[in-house]
Image (cartoon, grey):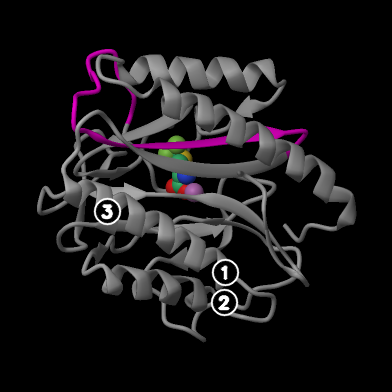
Amino acid sequence: MIAKEKDFADLRKAGKMLAHVLRELVVMTKVGVTTAELDLAAERMIKEFDAVPVFLGYKPEGSPTPYPASLCVSINDEVVHGIPHETVVIQDGDVVSLDLGLSYNGYFVDAARTVAVGEVDSAAQLLLIATKEALDAAIKAAKVGGYTGDIGAATVEVATKYKLGIVEDLGGHAVGRAVHEKPFIANDGVAGEGDKLLEGHVLAIEPMLCEGRGAIILDRDQWTYRMEDGKRAAHFEDTVILTKNGPEILTR
Ligand code: MF3
Ligand code: CO
């Protein structure tokens, strides 16, 4: 979508709702909690806002099954699209990414946070700091008249500074009227390349950094992406509107 002035109020409302729900989920992400409990809490809070959990039943082209939950929970070597389950219990030291989308009055927003649970090693702490910094840099690089590659290039710069890897093949995307809209925003972009960024673009910017090499594999469940080398990954995401005055972050 290209957001116009009339769309801003509802997009902002949707963003605030999602930020609130994620904040609550981050607090709940403690040792002993199951990922299914987090998913049910996400669904309940979204519905209390009269909003819709848009990942539930989402079936992108090429995926064999609809996504079965409202929330994606990806732990340690899992990167994105981890499916919540009653048997998956959060452990001390886990690096847990929570990724959630909702729609309100037809407006879609998407965001993610990664949480370090209990006693985590310093490498995990650095991974989170770096990925958060990559998100801030990537958002800053999103400018009307620029290119999707500028966003990826900002991610690459931060990853390089911290000597971390960048998750290959995945990336951000436009959002606004659907879970995924064009253009795609590669995490490992080159400045000045890719698609042109337009005023009113609503973008889900979501760098994913990793401790090892960037190669990923798709799990047998056909949803969960994990690092091929088994090392950990982190993921932060916000939805922004591109305005003449720069990106406006909706989901904080
Ligand atoms: N935030 C996720 C992404 O941008 C959307 C997940 S859709 C789901 O890829 F169906 F996997 F939940
Ligand atoms: Co997304």
Q: Earlier in the sequence, mark 2 or mark 3?
A: 3
Residue at left 56%, top 43%? 110
Looking at the rendered structure, the kind of residue marked 2 is Asp
Which of the 4 image quadrants contains residue 93? top left
Looking at the rendered structure, the kind of residue marked 1 is Lys
Residue at left 64%, top 56%? 240
How crowded pointer 3 is (Cα within 10 Å; few <14, some 14-19, many 20+) is rated as many
**Labelled disc at residue 217:** none
- Where disc 3 sits, the SS reads helix
Q: Residue furthest right?
A: 6
Q: Which residues are magenta?
A: 83-106
Looking at the rendered structure, the kind of residue marked 3 is Leu
Q: In this rendering, which labeled residue sits more in front, label 2 or label 3?
A: 3
Q: Which residue is mark 3?
A: 127
Q: Earlier in the sequence, mark 1 or mark 2?
A: 1
Q: Which residue is mark 2?
A: 195
Residues at marks 1 and 2, CA–CA distance in whole angstroms: 17 Å
Q: Residue furthest bottom?
A: 192
Would residue 99 be counted in the magenta stretch?
yes
Q: Position of residue 210 (x, y in %)?
A: 23, 56
- Where disc 1 sits, the SS reads helix
Q: Which residue is mark 1?
A: 140
Q: Earlier in the sequence, mark 1 or mark 3?
A: 3
Relative to 3, say whether 51 is above or below: above
Left or right placement of residue 198 versus residue 33 in this view: right
Residues at marks 1 and 3, CA–CA distance in whole angstroms: 20 Å
Residue at left 49%, top 16%? 41
Q: Position of residue 180 (x, y in %)?
A: 55, 50
